[in-house]
Amino acid sequence: MAELIDEMGLQDKAVGIPPPGCAVFAYNYFDVDMAESAHGRGAAVATGLKRACPETIVFTYQGDGDLAAIGTAETIHAANRGENITSIFVNNAVYGMTGGQMAPTTLLGQKTTTSPYGREKRIEGYPIRMSEILGLLKGTVYIERVAVNSPVNIRKAKRAIRKAFQVQIDGLGFALVEILSPCPTNWKMTPLEAWQWIDNVMVEEFPLGVIKDTTGKDDAS
Amino acid sequence: MAKVLFNGNSAIGEAAIRAGCQCYFGYPITPQNELTEYMAIHLSRKKGCTFIQSESEISAINMVFGASVAGVRAMTSSSSPGISLKQEGISYLAACELPAVIVNMSRGGPGLGSIAASQSDYFQATRGGGHGDYRTIVLAPSSVQELADLTYKAFDLADKYRLPVVILGDGMLGQMMEPVEFRYEAPEELPVRADAMRGAKGRPSRIIRTFTSNPATLEELNWSLFRRYQLIQQTEVACDTSMVEDAQLIVVAFGTAARIAKGAIKNARTAGLKVGMLRPITLWPFPTGKVKELAKRTRHFLVFEMNMGQMIEDVQLALAGAGEVSFYGRTGGVIPTPSEVLRVISRLYYQKGLK
């Protein structure tokens, strides 16, 4: 993302909306204006900001608990209004910052501190596929799921994020990139095992690829 | 400009537009829908302006947050249950030192309550409302004219002190029709704050945040907020008094209750009872000094509210034992009549042996 902000010349006009959660310190990692939102409210804050000043390039950076649990309403309605904003949705299947609790995206069978016996559909319900839900909405333009568990996938992720920014620059509407991201600490794996777990297990529930694209033109990259 | 007939809710909308409000976000709730509808008609297609009917009150206040980050004048409105939902956002606005105007045309509570006028949100409004150590300025209009006047003032105060300002009305003020004069023309250009965050062009990037992992840093933020609050307490108190010069008994009431009390006091005066009134216009900062000053003339105060007794605590704190405070209130959306209040005044007057 930071590379793209430079490559696409966005530093002067970008405002990022970092979340509470694992990425709470994101405001320190991007040298652009950053306005932290309340938990889950990123899409609403981005809406207000973008509407008040349409020349800005507004992106949210949100985790799975943020975007797909507490912020579900804000996310779905901003997407459905076709807000011209870009959402970066980091899915690591746990609440990381708070110590590895069950997330809306936790897989069936996955053990967390609040699903200690493994997530069971009868008791804890199913993992939610937020990107697919958003893809059904008429207001969304571009939704893609990527992963950052290999150099190849990281390059693909960058391409997707570039396109999601371009959608906003072109004024087309709501774009979101879901990023499957390893959390070795809370998954209790080595980094390598975590990378492999994304490939071998996580993509079964969250398949990679373009979920929706109505831009009608080639990848901007 | 000549006076025009407006309902209270619409008058706030018109005054907000004339104050340069660029963004309005709201969610339907009775008894304040006329305000949301007024903005839908008059703001949604206005050049450069935004009206969004949000998916929830939580979203609305967070949209206000975003618009305030971008440096424009932004507003949301609701009524009691919806204001409870907005408290998260109000706390964040206070923490980030972002201006915003929040209108509460309050109704009976707790819970879903009733849709009739009530003043039961006094504690919530004057004690910050959400989590954390903060205050908001709270303005309490008591007529449609004052709703308009205090709406302009709310935007100015929010910008001046960089904090959320609450206009605490009630369902009756919102619904009543009265002549009103709009004293300002809408600005040619919508105001944008100098500290607007719209991308780091020509300056280092900036961060607006509420989270800090260092308690000492957060303590310093709280000190900085409270120094500002002290300044507000010194300079922004507003209240109205009537017939207090010779008063043996002073009625303390705000908003709609003050309108009702006014009728009762007028009749009490006709009957020869020396009764006056103190009407706080800023509920926070509370007119503590004025209460103390009045206590030099009489020891007898009657606090009258449309709740079970909330502002009475501020009157007692101000008096610190220097006066006797009685209370009369109706709640749940019940509107007391002036003759009912007159009976309370008369009874109290003779019980206390006042002459």
Image (cartoon, coloured by chain):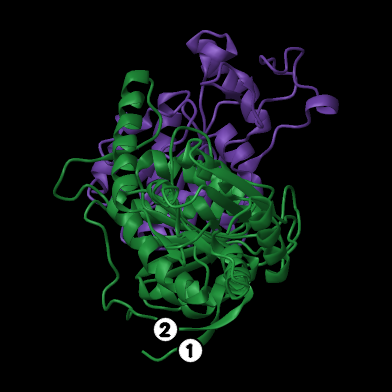
- Nearest to the observer: residue A8 or residue B241: B241
**Relative to B220, A143 lies left or right:** right
**Colour purple belongs to chain:** A
User: What's the residue at 35%, 71% (across, down)?
Assistant: B19
Say left or right for A38 vs A73.
Answer: left
Q: Residue at point 28% right, 66% down?
A: B191
Query: In the rendered structure, which amino acid carries the disc numbered 1?
Result: Val
Residue at label 2? B181
Q: Mark 1: give few (<14), some (14-19) or many (20+) Cα within 10 Å.
A: few
In this view, the residue in front, A101 or B58, is B58
**Residue type marked 2:** Glu
Position of residue A1 in the picture relative to residue B85 (left or right): left
Badge 1 is on which residue? B4
Expressed as whole percent of the image width and height from the top left, the position of residue A108 reads 74, 24
* Up/down of B30 relative to A193, above or below: below
Cβ–Cβ below 8 Å for labels 1 and 2?
yes
Residue A185 percent across, percent down from the top left: 52, 12
Which chain can be seen in green?
B
Asked whether residue B58 appears in the rendered view, the answer is no
Residue A30: percent from left, percent from top? 30, 34
Is residue B325 visible in the rendered structure shown here? yes
Q: Nearer the viewer, residue B198 or B345?
A: B345
Which residue of the protein is positioned furthest toward the left in this rendering? Answer: B202
Chain of the residue under label 2: B
Distance in Å between CA atoms under marks 1 and 2: 6 Å
State the SS at label 2: loop
